[in-house]
Image (spheres, rainbow, N blue to C red):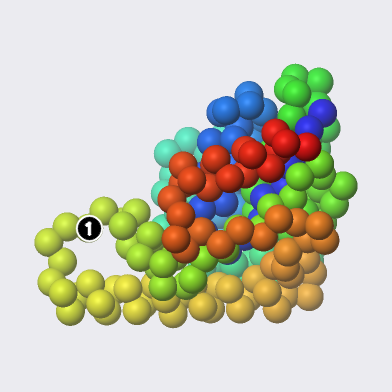
Amino acid sequence: MIEIAIDGTAASGKGTLARKLAEKYGYAHLDTGLLYRKVAYEIMIQNKNTIKNINYESCKIARNLNFLDFKSENLRSEEVSNLASIIATNNKLREIMDFKQKQFVENNKKKFGGCILDGRDIGTKILPNADFKFFINASIEIRAKRRLLEKNITFLHENDEKCMLQSLINDMNDRDRLDRTRLDSPLVPAKGAYIIDTSKINANELLEKVSKIIERT
């Protein structure tokens, strides 16, 4: 079974790459970031993000959630993303998530010829012996512009667009700092990972670049 670990920063293109690779090769795919977003979303709708012991509640929710049933919740909103980054610093929660991610890999070994996981500690913690490891990044300005385009907001005044873009940059800086400085599984390139900057290439070019790496070995 082929294991592919894809790590990287927000809006760098890692998720799109993982989905395209899974479709191309017929491998199982898990967006591990959605696991934390799902927990954050449940905390918010249950109004538990205002309580003091949010770490306990996040673990309680995580143990009982069906992570493969995401339905149509808005898991990619900025509010959900910010809370997901905060609860992701909880070591106990990460232990639960690590187990579920590894369980996903084990459960799919018999069904598919390969498995692709994308997130922030896949190559360093979840799949340290993966056949291929990739770390995807881009300049924060480019990432913020991509996220702004994802919002699909039309008829923004130029000044409003600049303010929203700067707000996204600030949020991403905060999230990057949380991800890179947490004590458990910080966001760093895994040993032996191919590090790819997507600032000047699109999703199809990234797919072609990564596919060549996989197929030439």
- Residue occupying image coordinates x 13% and y 72%: 157
**Quarter of the rendering containing residue 108:** top right
Q: Where is the C terminus found, in terms of image quarters? A: top right
Q: Position of residue 181 (x, y in %)?
A: 70, 78
For image coordinates 59% across by 67% down, the residue present is 85
Residue 195 position in % (x across, y down): 67, 60
Residue sitting at x 81%, y 20%: 110
Dot 1: few (<14), some (14–19), or many (≥20) neighbours within 10 Å? few
- Looking at the picture, tell me which residue is in the foreground, 210 or 90: 210
Q: Which residue is mark 1?
A: 153
Q: Quadrant of residue 66?
A: top right
Q: Please say if 119 is above or below 177.
A: above
Secondary structure at numbered mark 1: loop
Residue closest to the far right: 129
- Residue 112 in the figure: left or right of residue 153: right
In the foreground, 70 or 101: 101
Q: Amino acid at mark 1?
A: Ile
Q: Position of residue 17 (x, y in %)?
A: 55, 44
Q: Picture coordinates of residue 121 (x, y %)?
A: 73, 58
Please tell me which residue is depicted at 63% across the width and 26% down the height of the picture.
Answer: 25
Can residue 19 be seen here? The reply is no
For residue 94, side relative to residue 173 (left or right): right
Q: Residue furthest front?
A: 216
Q: Quadrant of the N terminus?
A: top right
Give the camera-side residue of 138 and 46.
Answer: 138
